[in-house]
Image (cartoon, rainbow, N blue to C red):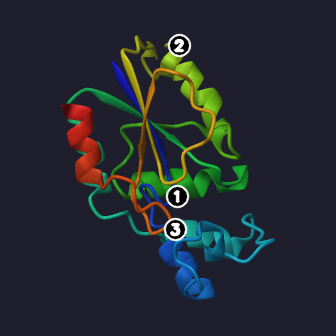
Amino acid sequence: MSVLVCDIDNTIADTSAELVRRYGPPADPSDYAAYAPEGVDWTTTEHLELFRRARPIPGAVEAIHRLQRHGWYVLYVSNRPKTAYDVTEDWLLAHDLHEGRMLGKVLGGHKTRVLRRALAGRIWTAFGPMDVEAVAYVDDKPVRVVPEGVQVLPHKRPWRPDGLTWPEIVEVLLS
């Protein structure tokens, strides 16, 4: 089975649009850090609601469904705080992204560990362990330490103009 390790914020959920609504547009849209002021407490009710209100990135849901129809298993990962687990799970369900698996212990950030486990075939599904044939990783800001053998597909955003759109990601993975 092929595994797609997929970031949530600004890869499938347009969290930056909610940040712009809350804090106004950044002075430099190419600077990812400029979208929210320093010191924001992401565990507050206000910011958990921001995660809940985020709309899907155009084409993301359809692309993930298409990949799943072609045998890709999706693992959702995020650097959101652990307090956002329920909000994140509800968001995935509300947007028909329930066929994958959200790794709760990855909330708070351990993406490199997930990539290593996927590559080693140490991922468990509801049906038991899976035999992993390929691992791809989609993120608007991919982690720097990516195990050898993982196909990294940066998602296109204002701070990542050299990234790929969702249709381009699907084309690469299905070719």
Residue 169 rendering spot, x and y as whole percentages: 29, 45
Q: Secondary structure at mark 1?
A: loop
In the image, 100 versus 152, the foreground residue is 152
Q: Residue at x 39, y 58 (%)?
A: 156
Could you tell me which quadrant the C terminus lies in? Answer: top left
Hey, what amino acid is under mark 1?
Answer: Asp
Q: Secondary structure at mark 3?
A: helix
Residue 3 rendering spot, x and y as whole percentages: 39, 27
On screen, residue 90 above or below 40: above
Cβ atoms at labels 1 and 3 below 8 Å apart: yes
Hey, what amino acid is under mark 3?
Answer: Thr
Q: Is residue 94 left or right of residue 23?
A: left
Q: Residue at x 72, y 65 (%)?
A: 42
> How many residues crowd mark 1 within 10 Å: few (<14), some (14–19), many (20+)?
many
Q: Which residue is mark 1?
A: 9
- Earlier-in-chain disc, 2 versus 1: 1
Q: Which residue is mark 2?
A: 120
Hey, what amino acid is under mark 2?
Answer: Ala
